[in-house]
Image (cartoon, rainbow, N blue to C red):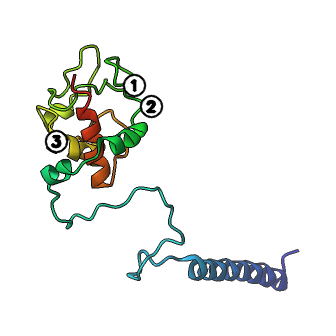
Amino acid sequence: MFDTMTLTKIVGAFCGALLVFLLGGWVAETLYHTGGDHGEDHQQAYAIETGIEEVDESAPEVDVAELMASADAAAGERVFSKCKACHKLDGSNGTGPHLDGVVGRAVDSVDGFNYSGALEEVAQVWDHEHLFGFLANPKQYAPGTKMSFSGLPKDTDRANLIAYLETFSG
């Protein structure tokens, strides 16, 4: 039943299948390899726009007082539309604490709101500087905060919003 010719055919078929498998793997690696572990430059095939601008760490410091001097509360009212989903200006809490009187108010001081405690680590009072930094990127400014808002990348939008919130200082 097993003669030399049959055994040679079986071994040859096995070697041929192994060769096809190895060559197929090599061809696939060559076609689809992105270069990450071979020291070559790696670039994404496509980028997903999230609408969030990357912050340039080498950017010059912003003079908040100068921005606040030229801030427009009416423009800040339009910016506040992004905040309305979670915050109110009538003294009642929503998903977030109410923001009337927030400028100059102690951090984590709204009665009846369950804060995360992360804000107390970075500020004591919501002054212009702290609000300006927090509104730029809440998660980066106060790691551990419950606020899921991604922030306002434009300096003028933040200044205008703070000016608008100052009109509700009660």
Q: In which quarter of the view is residue 77 placed?
A: top left
Label whose residue precedes the other's in the sequence (2 or 3): 2
Label whose residue precedes the other's in the sequence (1 or 2): 2
Q: Which residue is mark 3?
A: 128
- Whether tag 1 and tag 2 are in contact, CB under 8 A, the answer is yes
Image position of 58 with respect to 14: above or below: above
Is residue 111 visible in the rendered image? The answer is: yes
Residue at figure coordinates x 29%, y 27% from the top left:
99
Name the amino acid type tagged 2. Answer: Ala
Secondary structure of residue under mark 3: helix
Name the amino acid type tagged 1. Answer: Thr
Instruction: Give the foreground label among 1 and 3.
Output: 3
Q: Residues within 10 Å of mark 3 (few under 14, many from 20)?
A: some
Q: Residues within 10 Å of mark 2 (few under 14, many from 20)?
A: few
Q: Residue farthest to the left?
A: 124
Q: In which quarter of the view is residue 54 placed?
A: bottom left
Q: Which residue is mark 2?
A: 85
Image position of 169 with respect to 40: above or below: above
Q: Which residue is mark 1?
A: 95
Q: CA distance from mark 1 to mark 2?
A: 8 Å
Name the amino acid type tagged 3. Answer: His
Instruction: Give the foreground label among 1 and 2.
Output: 2
